Image (cartoon, rainbow, N blue to C red):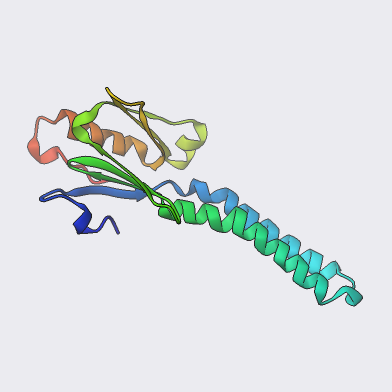
Amino acid sequence: MGLPKKLLGDAEQELLHLHTHAKALFLPVAVLLLTSTALGFVIALTPAEWRPTATYIETAVALLVFAAWVLLPFLRWLTTTYTFTDRRIITRSGILTKRGHDLPLSRINNVAYERDLLDRILGCGTLVLTTAAEAPVVLSDIPNVEDAHVMMTELLFGSDNPDDSVLDI
């Protein structure tokens, strides 16, 4: 979907807009499956004389687990975006309190990426952008991090062919 045009500068082009990798949702999905299964078993094992009060309590506990371990991580994933333009890198996050950080490409001195074994299996990684003035900007769980790394390198350090300055990821 990308950023709204009103948030981009004049003639600024959005090159890549993405969420963190879906691996952030693996644990919430597992918790959802375990919680719903456990709720079904607990309700089935509840003695008849304790119903319906016990069922309400059990369901309330399951809903609290759902909210804390499934809904909040999903909303964090949904609201965390990275947008790469031809002028800057824009990060946005936050459910109720929105946080944003814009990093002009002119301030970036070095682009690196890191991928552990799980990241290599899942096709993601961490993009590390080094500036002279600040601590490195670390963008975690970038899908296809190697392609994003190549795109950033092309943007920052140019290419021999001007038509190759933007890559499709």
Q: Residue at image x 23%, y 46%?
A: 168
Q: In the rendered view, does 61 fall on the left or right side of 125?
A: right
Q: Residue furthest front?
A: 97
Name the one closer to the observer, 160 or 26: 26
Q: In the rendered view, does 9 fall on the left or right side of 28?
A: left
Name the one closer to the observer, 155 or 5: 5
- The answer, for residue 19, to whether it is visible in the render is yes
Q: Residue at image x 91%, y 76%?
A: 49
Q: Quadrant of the N terminus?
A: bottom left
Is 26 rendered above or below residue 53? above
* Residue 148 found in image quarter: top left
Q: In the rendered view, does 123 fall on the left or right side of 118?
A: left
* Residue 96 found in image quarter: bottom left
Q: Residue at image x 42%, y 40%?
A: 124
Question: Percent from the top left, x then y, of residue 112?
Answer: 33, 27
Name the one closer to the observer, 117 or 142: 142
Is 134 rendered above or below residue 86? above
Question: Percent from the top left, x then y, of residue 117?
Answer: 50, 32
Numbered circles on residues, count: 0
Q: In the rendered view, does 96 fall on the left or right side of 16?
A: right
Q: Quadrant of the C terminus?
A: top left
Question: Percent from the top left, x then y, of residue 3?
Answer: 27, 55
Q: Residue at image x 26%, y 34%?
A: 150
- The answer, for residue 154, to whether it is visible in the render is no
